[in-house]
Amino acid sequence: MSKSGSLAQVCADNPGAFLGTADAQAEGELDGADHAKINRALAELGYAVVAEELPESDYDGPSRLPSHVQQPSWWRRFFGIF
């Protein structure tokens, strides 16, 4: 769940353990029916589900991240720690 807004990410393991939910399903680590149930439940609660691979892309908007973070990612912006 995002710390700001109604975003959620579904992962079969820790974020980044797989290339995405399709990869996790192909390896038998995420059941497709379970994934669909989770997505439905999150949608019913008002969450927008973000693909696992999307948050790792660069975020170029304003942020208050520590100076040692060279290029923040969407993950750090919406799910990580400031």
Image: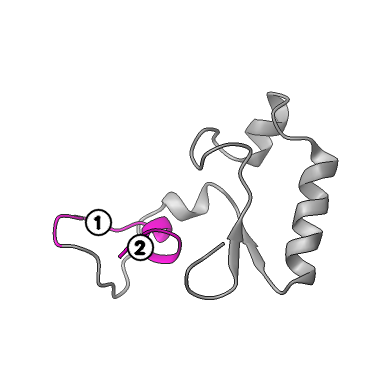
Dominant secondary-structure state across the stretch colored magenta: loop
CB-based contact (under 8 Å), mark 2 and mark 1: yes
Residue 3 position, x and y percent, is 47, 69
Q: Amino acid at mark 1?
A: Gln
Quarter of the picture holding the C terminus: bottom left
| In the displayed structure image, the side of residue 78 where residue 36 appears, left or right | right
CA–CA distance between discs 2 and 1? 7 Å
Picture layout, residue 60 above or below residue 56: below
Picture layout, residue 23 above or below residue 38: above
Picture layout, residue 68 above or below residue 28: below
For disc 1, the neighbor class at 10 Å (few under 14, some 14 to 19, many from 20) is few
Q: At 34% across and 61% down in the image, what residue appears?
A: 81
In the picture, the disc for residue 59 is 2
Residue 31 position, x and y percent, is 79, 35
Q: Which residue is mark 1?
A: 71
Q: At 20% across and 55% down in the image, what residue appears?
A: 69
| In the displayed structure image, the side of residue 20 where residue 36 appears, left or right | right
Whichever of labels 2 and 1 marks the residue nearer the N terminus, that label is 2
Query: Helix, strand, or loop for circle 2?
Result: loop
Query: Helix, strand, or loop for circle 1?
Result: loop
Q: Which residues are magenta?
A: 67-82
| In the displayed structure image, the side of residue 31 where residue 77 appears, left or right | left
Residue 72 position, x and y percent, is 29, 58
